[in-house]
Each structure stands twice: as C-alpha cells, then as structure tokens.
Image (spheres, rainbow, N blue to C red):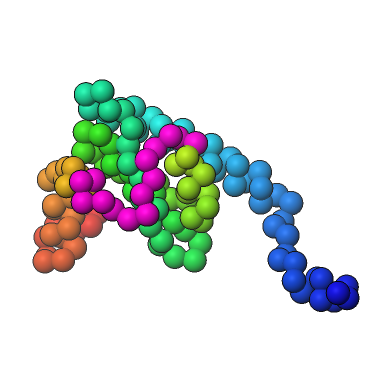
Amino acid sequence: MSETETAAATPPAEPADAAPKTDRQVRRLARNLTRFSSRHAAGGDSTADAVVEYIGRDSTRIVVVGADGQWGDQVARDPETARKAIEAAGLRLHDEFPNDVALRVKTGQYEWTRMAGIQIGGPANA
C-alpha cells in the first residue's frame, strides 16, 4: 500500500486538545448524573435509567429518569461522550425508552403549562 493510500484509509486524528475536553465533559456529566440518581432513589433502587437522544450535529441529549419517576436531562457533545458519562455514573443505559421507564416518568404543572403554552396559546415562554 502506498503512502497516499495509507493516509486516505486512516481517519484524521482529533485535535490534541479534544481528548482532555471530552474527558472533562464525561466527568462533569457523570457527576451530575450520579447526583441526580442518588437524589431520586426509591426504596432500595438508587439506579436511574438513561436514554441517549440525538439533537443535532454537535449535541446529544441524555434523558435520565430516577427510580422515583423524576426526570431531567443533560447535553453532551456527541453520543460517545454521553454513553461514557452514563457508564461512569453507573446508570442503566437503554437504546430507546422502555415502556416501564416511560410509565414511571412524573410530569408536573410546569411541564404541562410549558407544553400547552407552546402548542395552544398558553402562557408565553419566559
């Protein structure tokens, strides 16, 4: 294989400063996810469930549901970073929302007001 063919077959390397930034983001996200999971434990179950959702080219959403049904989200730069953070936090990772996790989600007045406000002329988004 010639040098040109080898260069074409090898993916470009990440910039030298990308790995430390990714590691910092994984640690920060994992710390937030761990804190959320422990605050929303129920009974003997302190492990939250997480799903990675695609937002766009430069961001990925981690949706996390606590054992008590409370939910939240965090944004990561890419799916791999999100998965690493979920693994570091010790959460259960799902490829898509399982029915039992979706049924456990609790929504409050805030969510219903925001959803209704956006779609049917409720209070303005402030």
Query: Residue at the spot x=32%, y=55% of the render?
Result: 96
Pick whichever, 71 or 52, lies toward us: 52
Image-based side of 56 in relation to 39, left or right: right
Q: Position of residue 49 (x, y in %)?
A: 32, 41
Indicate the quadrant where residue 38 lies: top left
Is residue 91 one of those drawn in magenta?
Answer: yes
Query: Residue at the spot x=18%, y=55% of the render?
Result: 114
Pick whichever, 2 or 111, lies toward us: 2
Task: Name the image quarter holding the N terminus.
Answer: bottom right
Is residue 119 one of those drawn in magenta?
Answer: no
Task: Name the image quarter holding the C terminus.
Answer: bottom left
Query: Which residue is outermost to the right?
Result: 2
Query: Residue at the spot x=72%, y=65% of the render?
Result: 12
Q: Position of residue 121 (x, y in %)?
A: 12, 65
Indicate the quadrant where residue 95 lies: bottom left
Query: Which residue is outermost to the front?
Result: 1
Image-based side of 41 in relation to 111, left or right: right
Does the image show residue 81? yes
Magenta segment range?
88-101
Vertical order, 52 against 45 (above or below): below
Vertical order, 28 against 113 (above or below): above
Query: Residue at the spot x=27%, y=28% of the render?
Result: 45
Pick whichever, 65 or 112, lies toward us: 65
